[in-house]
Amino acid sequence: MTNLDDLPIRRDLVGQLPYGAPQIDVPIRLNVNENTFGIPEEVALKIVQRTAEAALTLNRYPDREFIELRRMLAEFLGGNLAAEQIWAANGSNEILQQFFQVFGGPDVKAISFGPTYSMYLNIARTTMTDYQLLPRLGDYSLTEDYVRQEILKAQPQIVILCSPNNPTGTGTSLEVIEAAYDSFEGMLLVDEAYQEFANSPSAISLLPGRPRLVISRTMSKAFAFAGARVGYMAADAAVVDAMRIVRLPYHLSALTQAAAMAALETSGQLLANVQQIKVQRDRIMVGVLKMGLRPLPSDANFVLIEGFDDTQMIFDGLLSKGIIVRDIGIAGCLRVTAGTEAETTKLLGELALLLD
Ligand SMILES: *Cc1c(COP(=O)(O)O)cnc(C)c1O
């Protein structure tokens, strides 16, 4: 057995760590913003039926352009999008990676406004793109003036806006997104992983006439489809053509395509719990506020809670009761996913006991 340190890995990767949100098998998992409602049996049967059909032709490579799936995704998003404006991959993380592979690289500077999704840094790193994290305003919001000023100062070629933002839950107005777009000449990616939970509108409506705008989405959160690994994006058809240069041939397996189409055919059932999750999110906010904590207003399916004296004690205490939440590395803060009513009840009950 050799040691990682003994291997001739790329010099810029020495000492770097892989993404590693803990995967601990406890009854209540509120740490990675999954939809905690299970897949309805009817949906599961549809998936089995679609994948069984695909299984009969697994000797052949899948449709490299997965045009049928793209047509269905375009229809799901609405806004008169054509299938040629849609691209999909194994999770929106792969969308992000392909985006950085084609638009990033050694001479490119990307920026985002933090705290935000940690994978932007990781993907910038593996694509050798310079990445600068600029601070958000005091309440983690962004304004037109602030975004414009920071982009003019930083002179980036790529801007990433996460909206609603992970881990703060903060939404971004369309005016801010427009201001960002107009402040530079490069590519603007809006990561809408949590858009289905938001009250603020999607940036999809901004696509016409904005060829440098990319909206990424995922089936991992609201769609309850994290295990299937399906992310997608909408953009100008030319951006999709650019992504096709770097994608690996046949990157989306026939089984993934079949499962995703089954999910889209039953999207009504898969998305049925979004409203209930928003109710639980708001219940968590009200509940922890009463405990003297400071929950941030959230447009997503999670709440960032500030004001813990000892986050490690709370994290460990909840874990010992079978509940895992997320320590995202901000002092005094924990992030909690909104799940079922029973999960919220248990979470709030145990949290109150620990704070006492
Ligand atoms: C969860 C998440 C994603 C997505 O992940 P995939 O499972 O790869 O689709 C993307 N962006 C943000 C901000 C997320 O929180």
Image (cartoon, rainbow, N blue to C red):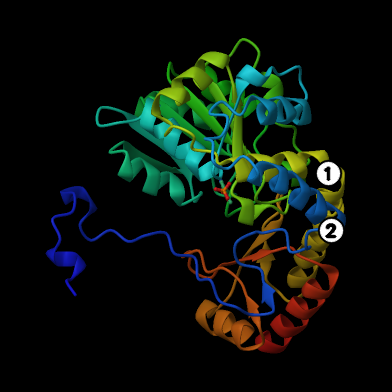
Q: Position of residue 156 (x, y in %)?
A: 37, 27
Q: Which mark is residue 40?
A: 2
- The answer for how far apart the CA atoms under marks 2 and 1 are is 10 Å
Q: Is 84 left, or right, of 344 in this rendering?
A: left
- Kindly indicate the quadrant of the structure image that contains residue 268: top right
Q: Crowding at label 2, few (<14), some or many (≥20) Cα neighbours within 10 Å? A: few
Residue bearing mark 1:
266
Task: Say which of 215 and 110 sits in front.
Answer: 215
Q: Position of residue 334 (x, y in %)?
A: 58, 68
Quadrant that contains the N terminus: bottom left
Q: Is 70 left, or right, of 159 in this rendering?
A: right
Q: Crowding at label 1, few (<14), some or many (≥20) Cα neighbours within 10 Å? A: some
Q: Is residue 49 above or below residue 351?
A: above
Q: Are marks 2 and 1 in contact (CB under 8 Å)?
A: yes
- Kindly indicate the quadrant of the structure image that contains residue 315: bottom right
Q: Position of residue 237 (x, y in %)?
A: 57, 15
* Residue 250 in view (yes/no): yes
Residue positioned 46% across, 25% down in the render:
243
Q: Position of residue 239 (x, y in %)?
A: 50, 19
Three-letter code, disc 1: Thr
- Say which label, 2 or 1, has the lower sequence index: 2
